[in-house]
Amino acid sequence: MTSSSSQMAAARVSADQLLAQLRGFVGQRHVLTDEQSTRRFRKGHRTGEGEVLAVVQPGSLLEQWQVLQAAVAADRIVIMQAANTGLTGGSTPDGNAYDREIVLISTLRIPGVQVINEGEQVVCLPGATLDRLEQTLAPLNREPHSVIGSSCIGASVLGGICNNSGGALVRRGPAYTQLALYAQVRADGTLELINHLGIDLGETPEEILTRLQNGQYTAADVHNDTGRAASDARYGDDVRQVDADSPARFNADPSRLFEASGSAGKLCLFAVRLDTFPKEPSTVFYIGSNNPDDLTEVRRFMLTSLPRLPIAGEYIHRTAYDIGEKYGKDTFLLIDRFGTAKVPKAFAMKSRVDGFFERLGLRGVSDRVVQAVTDKMPSHLPARMQEWRDRFEHHLLVRVSNDTAEVAHEFLKNFFASSTSGAFFECDAEEGRKAFLHRFAIAGAAIRYREAHQKQVQDILALDVALRRNDRDWVEQLPVEMENDIIHKLYYGHFFCHVFHQDYIVKKGVDPIEMEHRMWKLLDARRAEYPAEHNVGHLYVAKPSLAGFYQQLDPTNTFNPGIGQTSKARNWGDCCEGSGQWNGYREESSGASQ
């Protein structure tokens, strides 16, 4: 059957017929169609929202395959989603200007993590979270690619791979693998399951998926001579090049786009195979300064002169510190007292509460209630951190392995002995843990601020920026007219990688999209790349190389159409006004000039 005749046949599959098929695969309770039950899946964590025909929750890999087969055969759009913790709306619909109905497949009911090669690698299924992976590896004294950050809010392992998520760990770089099991829609509309896991699992999709789900394979079935990588081994060398006139990592880097890695939902992933890493005893140093050049010198020494790379280096500006302390307190306390595993359930409950009140015309009720409660609580941060907050504008948290702690301490002691602008202290275990937890609680604080100050705030403009490795002028200077349109600027990020998160709380009446475009021009002038690690989602324009990668993976534009503001139309054709029109490769820049 030709592609066009396939589409004609698919058009005859009504919504009711498709829904009946889906219910037959996964059960009625796992096919959600009403507005309230689908809300937390079709509305992004920070941005993005649209209508769906259904949210389907398969409970096994085989069910996921059956659901996918039915949706593709019926010529519907498929959006794959795991934890829905993305910050750029990349796993939710973007408005309603699509030319086909959307089936959103939520994979959280498939959470498997399988340890192979004596713990040196793992196979993760679609619903596996970083938190679950971290817990699985803990008894083996090993760690996943990312150990805190996105894991705080329940992010999925496969989501990180799809987005080349960067994370905080200096030695490990972006999430990356060349070993994956995925489904792809070919140019003729046929669906194919491709096994590049390097594990013998059989021949048919049904056999492969069932055996993998049940762990029905032996060490002899696992091949370690595939020539394919399960992590980004070259990143350590890249980040040490502090005089290089280019960023260390960014989402559109063609050298880090490979099948599942960086695919942004343009494939349907069933599993990925990843390296794990030894867990090491470590020491945290807390550094403060009123001169950004101090932090630059610390960064350059740590990356070039320590015997081994630091484990992590996180920057916090004083304003971000303050907003995070006040408006991220509940996130901090939730994780501090109950662990990261409770966060996804808390977010799901919050979504249900907000959905109920939004139907009554009331937005942000849960945020305002929680904020009123936490405002009455005492500060949750250690006394020495608070002292450094009062003394210094710029804060840097540095975690090093204990075998390099003495060298790091000696350098800091000598460096700040002659500095009048900065100082440091060595954290005890509790201070170090809370310092890093505070840094990651900042990430959602601007959202809470917006909901608590709706009359003053138009919206949040959130940028995710990779500066050149040799850029010493990393502190942003905005034109006065832009400063006047902003209530607060939150700067924080992965300092040693020169990746910064820049959240701007925009005043009421100011157009945040117009401001974003002005920000892009400033970043282009600095030869920065963006986004750096959260991927384009529906906020950024995909650069030509990235858009071409998406089109290569998904020639019919079945999966996640419109990502990177590309076409939402079948076969990448022109689509509706306002949907991110696509006429071949766009010339607009989503980073440095082409």
Image (cartoon, helix red, strand yellow):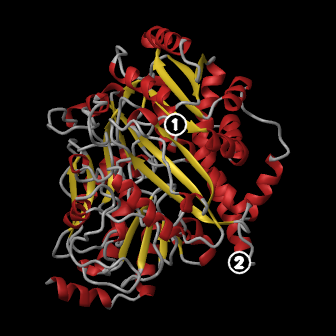
Residue drawn at the location 73% of the way across and 58% of the way down? 367
Q: Position of residue 539 (x, y in %)?
A: 43, 65
Amino acid carrying mark 2 in the image:
Arg
| Residue 112 appears in the figure | yes
Q: Secondary structure at mark 2?
A: loop
User: In the rendered image, which quarter is residue 318 located in?
Assistant: top right
Q: Position of residue 229 (x, y in %)?
A: 22, 37
Rendered image quadrant of residue 91: bottom left
Q: Earlier in the sequence, mark 2 or mark 1?
A: 1
Task: Look at label 1 and name its amino acid.
Answer: Ile
* Image location of residue 128, percent across then percent down: 45, 46
Q: Which residue matches tag 1?
A: 148
- Image location of residue 330, percent across then percent down: 72, 45
Residue at the location (32% across, 79% down)? 581
Answer above or below: position of 266 versus 143.
Answer: below
Question: Is any atom of residue 1 visible in this view?
Answer: no
**The one of 185 and 91 positioned closer to us in this rendering:** 91
Pick out the residue farthest to the front.
480
Q: Is residue 487 left or right of residue 297?
A: right
Residue 274 versus residue 568: which sits nearer the camera?
A: 568
Residue receiving disc 2: 359
Q: Is residue 493 left or right of residue 164?
A: right
Image side of residue 66 versus residue 494, left or right? left
Q: Is residue 134 left or right of residue 455?
A: left
